[in-house]
Image (cartoon, coloured by chain):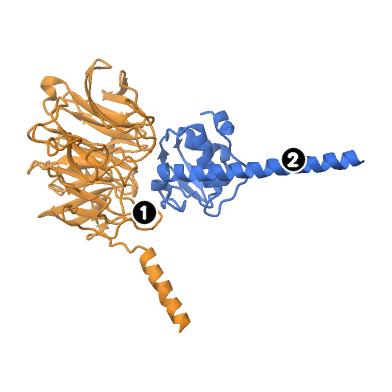
Chain colours: A orange, B blue
Amino acid sequence: MKSIISFFGIVLVCFYSCAQQKPSKVEAKTPIKTNYTTQIVVPELDIPWGMEFLPDGSILITEKDGRLIHFKNDNKTEISGFPDVYVRGQGGLLDVKLHPEYASNDWIYFTYGSSEGEGTGGHTALIRAKIDGNQLVDIQHLYKGEGNTKKGQHWGSRIEFDNEGYLYFSIGDRGNRDVNPQDITRDGGKIYRLNDDGSIPEDNPFVNEENAKKAIYSFGHRNPQGMIKHPKTGDIWTHEHGPRGGDEINIIKKGKNYGWPVISYGINYSGTTFTDITEKEGMEKPLFYWVPSIAPCGMAFVNSDRYPDWNGSLLVGSLKFEYLERLIIKNKKVVKREKLFENLGRFRNIKLAPDGYLYAGVEGIGIVKIIPDSF
Amino acid sequence: MKFLVISLFSCLGFCGIVSISNQDKLQESIIRGSEVYSDFCINCHMANGEGIEATFPPLANSDFLKNNQEESIRGIKYGQKGEITVNGKVYNGYMAPLGLDDEEVADVMNYINNSWGNSNKTVVTTEVVAGIKK
């Protein structure tokens, strides 16, 4: 009898300690045939975190270690004058984004790790600046997360504009999971919305909340490293890293709580759990979750007649499995997933350029252009 | 003779104390190193140092780590680029410089040297890390 009781005891312990994760609803598969291939256009980059395409056809590239590179006529030139970048863990020089009216105003936006302000360590900062020759000029500091920390994790960050000209950017939870994401008086674990000059829009959701960070647009995020405006609806879509499992795709809505770490499909790296629930009133469920994690970075909608096979799909880089993921989404549901260009390398970024071609930043390789396969 | 015996014993005792305090230092360093590991390393090398097949090399029972201490320290300190062979498998990834100070590099080295079945009682000190150049 005693042995039966202890047997059930062991079973129970196993049941509660070995977290069972529900795999993604759709499995990623290798397509039988892909009609596109990759061609290296900017060789030899380490971590091409962000990239932007200038009207003259040249490319601006942010290297995580702090270098801002201008690639023009097959030459790389380093742009000098960037503020001090605090390189630590996942932090460094992060995203770059042109103003929607760059052609007339020359503004370029950047996010990066900065140790400005009080306390040791650093936090994510947003600036805008212009380029004069090989020099960064007219630098304006628009936002800096407060509460510097030496933690290495979760800086975000991507920058995007919506159709009304508002700027959105992300900061991850900065390794303070149980404090930052659910507290709107603290930076970290948020999507922020600003006017293009860094001022706070009057109708931001928490402008009237005492002590709140008024720039916050949504909260309860872990580490969003993908953000893109939907080409048809104009909505801001993001994805974020989960821990072990639980990466998410979300459509960002004003003032909403995306639940980290209260609701999640993820578990700790060690295999233990930090939450048992995946839904709760007042919290947004993801449009899609990845279990296992693919470690998503960079995000682009295919909206170009150069890719008839893929048009309308969402592309997401996978740092962990070293492929580019194509997701087909119907009625806000992922119905199919494909692994593209497997084993090419860690896909850090993916963008649709003004020339209608897709470009991906791949670690250790450089920038690759996705072109029709002529064979 | 008596003097010799006494000095022999005190010498032994002294060595013992040194060795105990060295091991204490190693233990303290390992504890600090475990925190560095879960901050900076775990998302690629995973909780049990097993890495990710074909992408991120394992640290657990890694012949590379065991036989290339200096290269391993250099990789953590300055970043690791280019081909390496770990347990017979070739990896050609890129690990960015992590921005750790020399003490943190020493601590995390002592942690990975002594976790998941790895054992290496030679303490990696801050001075050793400081001496390793790019």
Residue A185 in the image: state x and y as whole percent. Answer: 23, 38
Give left or right: position of A137 versus B38. Answer: left
Task: Please give left or right for residue A334 compared with residue A83 in the image.
Answer: left
Name the residue that disc number 2 marks.
B14
Q: Is residue A275 above or below residue A234?
A: below
Residue closer to the observer: A375 or A29: A29
Residue occupied by mark 1: A268
Asked if residue B14 shows in the view, the reply is yes
Q: Where is residue A102 in the image (x, y as percent from the top left)?
A: 14, 24
Distance CA(mark 2)–CA(mark 1): 45 Å
Write down the quadrant of residue A62 in the picture. top left
Mark 2 lies on a secondary structure that is helix
- Of all chains, the one bearing label 2 is B
- For the N terminus of chain A, the image quarter is bottom left
Q: Are marks 2 and 1 on the same chain?
A: no
Specify the amino acid type for callout 1.
Asn
Mark number for residue A46? none
Count of residue discs: 2
> Picture coordinates of residue A34 (x, y %)?
23, 50
- Where, by quadrant of the figure, is residue A200 drawn? top left
User: Can residue A371 be seen here?
Assistant: no
